[in-house]
Each structure stands twice: as C-alpha cells, then as structure tokens.
Amino acid sequence: MTMPRALQALTLVTAMLSLSAFCIADDSFILLSFSLVAAALSGVLAQGARPRRLPTIVAHSIIASLVAAGAVLAFIDDRPPGIEQIGFLCATALVIKLFARHRAADERHVLALGSILLLVAALDGTDVLAGVPLVVGSLLMPVCAAAAWVQSSTERAAAAHAARIPSGALPVSFDPTFGASPVRSWTGFAITSVIVTAICGVLVFLGFPRQGLEGETWSRTRAGGFSLRVSLASDERIEDSRTEVMTVRWIGPDGVAIEHNKPLHLRGAVFDRYDPISQSWQVPQQSRREYIEGDGAEFVPFVDSGIDARFQVYRQVVQMRGLAANQVFSVLAPISIQAASGMSVALDQSTMLLSGASSRIGEFDRYAVSVKPYASDRDMKLLSGEFVESGPPPAFPVAGVQPLALELWERWKPRGRVVPDLDEASRRPAARWERNRAVATALESALLSGDFRYTTDLGSIVRPRGEDPIVNFLASSRQGHCQYFASALCAMCQSMGVDARVVAGFIALEYDAPQSQYIVRSSNAHAWVEVRTGDAQWTTFDGTPPTTLEAMQAEQRSWADGLRWLWDPLNFAWTRHVISFDFESQAELANSMASTREALSRPFRAVSEALDAVRQRLAETFSGLVGGLWIVSIGVVLAASIVVVVLLRGKRRRTAPLLGPGASPRERELARHYLDALRIASRLGALRRPGMTPFDVAEALAVRSPEAAKHLRSVVEGFYAVRFGGRPATAERCSAAARSLMAMRLARTS
C-alpha cells in the first residue's frame, strides 16, 4: 500500500467517525444512515481501481450553493443559523468532498470539515453513543493531519522536480515508500500522536471544565426527555426514546413494594406564569429553600416535628440509570430523604421541589424519599415553613382562553350542587378551595372526554400567524402532546381565577412485577397540572388521556428493552462524569487526588521506616572488626557478581550482530570462538582489512603460521556450517572449535 492510499483510507475512516459523532449528537439517525452509506460508496467509486471522481469545480459549486441557500434562509428567518444547521451544512459538504478528493488539498478540506463536525458534536452531544466516535475521531485527527502534510510536501517536491527535468527524460516517482521500515516508523508515530493527543485532551478536559455564558455551568437536560422548560413555540416532534432513565420501587406503609393504584407523577420542575411573547411557561419568581445533609442509611426529615409519619407514608427508592440531572424526582409531598452521607439536598418550600444543593449534575444516582401522597393541609403548611401566600385570584394573560374555558365549564360543570362563584371565593378561603377543585375537575373531564387527541407529531397542525398555541389547541386543532394538555388545563384554570401551575417530570406507567419496581423511560417525560385546594395544599390534575399513554407505552416495547440495563448505566456514567464536569467537579477531583496521594504515600513511608530500622540493625550487627570483615566480604562478592554480569552481557553484545536475539547458548558460544579466532589471527599479524573474508585472513595467516591458519579455517568452517548451513550447534562442534582456538594460541609464527 502506498502512502497516498493509506492517507485516503485513514481520512475516510476519520470522516465517517466525524459524521457519526455529529449525527448521533443531533439525533439525526436518517442523516447518519445516508451519510455513512455515501461515505462508504465514495471509498469504492472515487478511490477504486478505476476512480470516478466528482470534478472539483462541480463539488465547490454545489457547496457554495448550499451555503448561499443557508444564508438566504437565515435572512428570511431573521436569526443566525444554529449549531445544528452549521453541522448539517458541514456534514453535507464533507460527503460531497469525499467524492471529489484526489489531491492532498482535498484531504485537508475533508479533515477541516471533520474537525468542525467533531467540535459541534462536543458542544451538542450528551450521549455516550456520540462520545465514542467523538473521542476516536479526535485521536485520529492529528495522525491524518501529519499524513496529509507529508503527502502535500511530496506533491510540491514532485511538481518542482517535474519543472526542472528536460523534455523526453524518464519520470521519477515521488511517492513515499511504504515498506516494512516506513510502516514501523509511521506506526510508532501514530501511536505516539494518539497518546500525546489523549494526554493533552485529558489535561484540557480537567483544566478547563465546560462553562456556559455568564458563569453558568454547561448543563443540558435534553438527554432523558425531561426539560426545565415548557415551550409551545416549536412544532418539533417530542422525544419518544425507550432509554431507561430510572427505576422506582414504591414501598407501601407496610414496608412491601407494591404497584400504586394510579400512575406515579415524579415532579422535577414547576411553572406558574405564562409568557405569551415567548409562548412558554416561566418558573416562580420567588423560592424558599431549606437545606439538609444526607445521613447515609438514615432518613433525614425536612421538618423537625409536627408531621405524623405513621399513617399513609410511602417510600420511593430511585435508582438513576440513563439520566444525570440535578433534580431529585419525587411524588408530592416529600417529608424525608435518604441520601449518601455528605450530599446536600435543597427543598423549595414554595413548590415542594427537591434538588441537589450544588450545581453538579448527576450527583444523586440513588436515593429514597418518604412521601405522603395524601398529605393534609396542616402537613403541607409545616413543610412550607408556615409561610402561606394568600393573594388575589390569578388571571391568564391571553384573552382568548377565558371564553373557551367558560364554554367547557358550562358543558362539564357538576350538576345538582352549587359551586361558589368568584366573588364568594374571594371572601371565604374555604369557598375558594371548593371552587378551585370543582373547576379543575370539570375542565380535566373535558380534556379527557375524547374531544382532544394526543399526538407527539405536530407537523400536521396548522396555526395562523399570531395565534397563541393554547388558543389554537382549544379552538381549532384539539391535538397535541402532554405539554399542550397541561398548558391548556392550567391556562383555563387561571383564566377562571383558579390557582394552578404546570409541573414537569416523569410519569411512571410501566410496572415490572417480577422486580417489584417501576421502569421509567425517556418517553415517560410528562407535564401535568397542580391546583391549589388548601392554604398550602396542592392537588394533581392530569388532562392527558392515561389510556393513550399506556397504549403508546405498550406499542413502543421491543426486544431491545431487555438490553438497556447494560447500555443505560454507561450513558448515565458518561453524563455524570463527562458531560456535567464543571468547576465544582474539578475541585472535588483535586481533593480526591490529594487524598489519594496521601493514601499512596503511607506505604512508601512505611517502607522507608522499615529500611531505616534494617539499616540501624545492620549497623549494630556489623560494628567492630568482625563486622568490618563481613561488610568487606559482602562487598567483594557483590563486586564480583557485577563483573560477571557485565562480562556475560558484553559477550552477548559481541555475538548479537552475528546471530540475532534468538540464538541458543551453544550458537553464541560458537560465535565467540569465531570472533576470538579472528582476534588471535590479528595478533599473529594477519589483519582483516575491508573486503577480506575470514578465509582470506586464513590465507594471509598461512604465510606466517600454517598451523594457526589450519585451525582458523576449522573454526570458521564450523561456525559457517551452523550460521549459514543450518547445521545444529552440538557440544562436539563447540568442543572442536575450543580445541582449535587453544591450538591457535599455542601456534608459533615463522
């Protein structure tokens, strides 16, 4: 294989790794399939025995057209292209260049585009599946760059030489040789480059943690389906991945793991205000946090006293598997937590949300929470720190929602009983909570009636420009995913003066009876509504049809679910230790390394102390004349041993050029006799000059000592028979050579 062919193959592999890293990071598996097939096809067509390459001008024209089209679209949308659009453009240009590469410059273009894709994947990827080609491609990139530089230098030298040779002269090939020796050299260089690149990458990773803008740590919640943002502005299809993000054991009051009588709503985020401009829900402006420290095996309560933990208390034991997040997912209302010792947990008393006190993502990989799903208003007051807000009834900022809410209220309001109106609810708190519950129940029933359809694909929904997505959902399309159902229910409640908020998290539907635990997957990311039904009490209402969610859960099951127990922990470890590595993780690593260094130094100190004790004991034992004689004797023995070892190694080095490293002891002995015989011949006056064979030396020696020349021929013939004739180096042959050598020493010169 020539150097250009090796460079082309290595560049193709690196390009495919770059494409894989970007496509997986962007969840573009269709693009991944087409780009990898096209890249492999380019290796067959453009680099085969009869290459069919795309002309350079055509390739550059196509790429320029794509860039111009992207610029026009960005101008029409009035916003700069995102990182995904830049990556898609580079991926397309990379595939085109693979069909047009025939010079070192084309290889450099491919490597430059691949480097951009690796950078985009590093910024955009959160999955270990994207991390594998990202790491491997980054390690191979310096090797490809060095090979491209060598090839480019060769092409320049060939062009300069071709310009100087006269016409009609024979051409000279300037392809770098690629025999055994260059292969070893390049292999050593490639291994060294990979090691150096890996070391530099690790140092940069540890020294410069991923940091967002304005000092915020880089954290993405895209992995796992859960998001800290509920936005209705996008019509993209929501994630329906089967990745297992956690398992939950639901333990009843009697201490036995059971399946609850309804799905578990695991809370992760709360939103209470809608912004019609961004068409998204906002988190509460004020939060009151209470911090506690984990105590290992013990449950630490959030409130010191007052809550009766003997009745209707459940425990949820959570094992995170495929999602690393800062949230501690829990059912309402948590009363105590069991976490690892030293872990700090924050309880937001205004929303009852749990989270890690530090900014490190994935800190809580296993925890248990005691909850009271049916907590009384008194218990909720204690958990909220006795701080109860009693403001006026809320209002919704989009005027078009209230008429639609009133229309559904008239159809679904309870019959046969009087529901307090808004004026009475404003005067009496009890009437307010009664009205909140009645309105929320009626509107929830309207959404569950079958008039609204659940779908994860919003591409077919037509929404006029300027129309709010909640109004469009209630009045026109009547289809959407859980965020639309929750947003509509909360918006209608607020428009009618009912205290309501949107909650995001996971819904546990899949119960594994043999393991007595719920399996929560990425597709179980969910949004629902909580309505205030007491001074500090909130009740869960979910307008999303549960039968539809369960049916979709059953349809998505496949044989691959049984293998996710192996893959998902790897993804969790990648997210926890790599993606979420920030300055706090850096400080923890430094402290851990300091502790490790201290722990490793203890054995060395123990060995040093033991050596000091031995030295002191020896000093006491070998003191005086007898001790001195012992020390001298040991020194002589050691010196003699060293001399013997040096002599033996010297003899082996003498014979190594003649025999190689795999020679037997008898072959080495015969080679030593051969060299000694030539040295004796030189001492007798027959010097071996350049170009002389050992037999020429014997002829020269015959003039001075025929007897010595005869014995020299005998030693040389014996050595040649073994070295070149394939004869065995027997003991008799070695003894004969030794006798001939002795005879040469005794021979006289004339």
Image: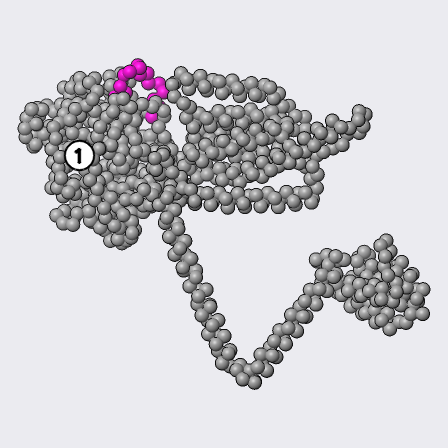
Image point (79%, 26%), residue name: 166
Q: What residue is shown at x 76% (from left), y 58% (from top)?
A: 658
Residue 212 can be seen, yes or no: yes
The verdict on residue 578 being magenta is: no
Q: Which residue is mark 1?
A: 539
Give the quarter of the image for residue 54. top right
Residue 5, visible in the rendered structure = no
Farthest residue, direction top: 464
Who is closer to the viewer here, 291 or 682? 682
Q: Quadrant of the C terminus?
A: bottom right
Q: Left of 259 or right of it: where is 561?
A: right
Secondary element at image label 1: strand
Q: Is residue 515 above or below residue 36?
A: below
Tell me: 84 left or right of 7. left
Expressed as whole percent of the image width and height from the top left, the position of residue 745 reads: 85, 71
Q: Nearer the viewer, residue 326 or 594?
A: 594
Residue 32: x and y in percent read: 49, 29
Most prominent secondary structure in the magenta stretch? loop
Residue at 9 percent across and 29 percent down: it is: 432
- In the image, 91 versus 595, the foreground residue is 595
**Which image quarter: residue 259?**
top left
Q: Is residue 51 left or right of residue 128?
A: right
Which residue is painted at 50% across and 27% down in the image?
91
Q: How many marks?
A: 1
Camera-nearest residue between 233 and 522: 233
Point out residue 684 in the picture as x, y percentages from the top left corner: 87, 67
Quadrant in the picture for the N terminus: top right
Judge the density around disc 1: few (<14), some (14-19), many (≥20) Cα neighbours within 10 Å: some
Task: Identify the amino acid type marked 1.
Answer: Thr
Q: Which residues are magenta?
A: 456-470
